[in-house]
Image (spheres, grey):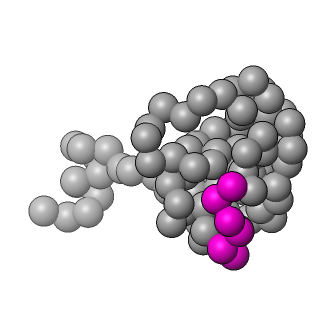
Amino acid sequence: MKEEDKARLLGRALSKRPVGGEHVVDRQKALAPFREPDSVARVFCAGCGALMELDQEGAAKLTAGAPVGSFAGAWLECSRCICCDAAFKDVQTRRG
């Protein structure tokens, strides 16, 4: 079957395009207790508004190995994330 016929019958999956915007974190949500027992930090994306929990491995990748205790009363913030772009960009630590 030709690609055009497949697309006409089944539709096409489009590439996810980056979402623009300067979202603002809800500090209560960013500092709330974790839902998952393995979570040690949260990352908020100002580009799309996603707020995700990170385990120790994920947090270490985004912070170049910062100690886990350094996230108490803090969260990570980025300008782009894996939900709206190919990778996390401009990651910074924010304090509540």
Residue visible at 77% across and 62% down in the picture: 91
Residue visible at 78% across and 45% down in the picture: 74
Residue 8 in percent (x, y) is at 28, 46
Q: Residue furthest front?
A: 69
Residue 63 in percent (x, y) is at 71, 68
- The residue nearer to you, when weighing 36 against 5, is 36
Magenta stretch holds residue 91: no
Quarter of the picture containing the C terminus is top right
Q: In this view, does 36 lie above or below 2?
A: above
Quarter of the picture containing the N terminus is bottom left
Q: In this view, does 23 lie above or below 84?
A: above
Which residue range is magenta in the image? 63-69
Q: In this view, does 49 lie above or below 68?
A: above
- The residue nearer to you, when weighing 2 against 41, is 41
- Say whether residue 48 is left or right of residue 74: left
Q: Can residue 78 be seen in this view?
A: no
Q: Is residue 37 visible?
A: yes
Q: Which residue lies furthest to the bottom in this view?
A: 64
- Say whether residue 47 is left or right of residue 54: right
- Say whether residue 66 is left or right of residue 55: right
Residue 54 in percent (x, y) is at 55, 51
Q: Which residue lies furthest to the top in this view?
A: 28
Magenta stretch holds residue 64: yes
State the image quarter where residue 4 is shown.
bottom left
Residue 94 in percent (x, y) is at 85, 48
Residue visible at 51% across and 66% down in the picture: 57
Count numbered badges in the picture: 0
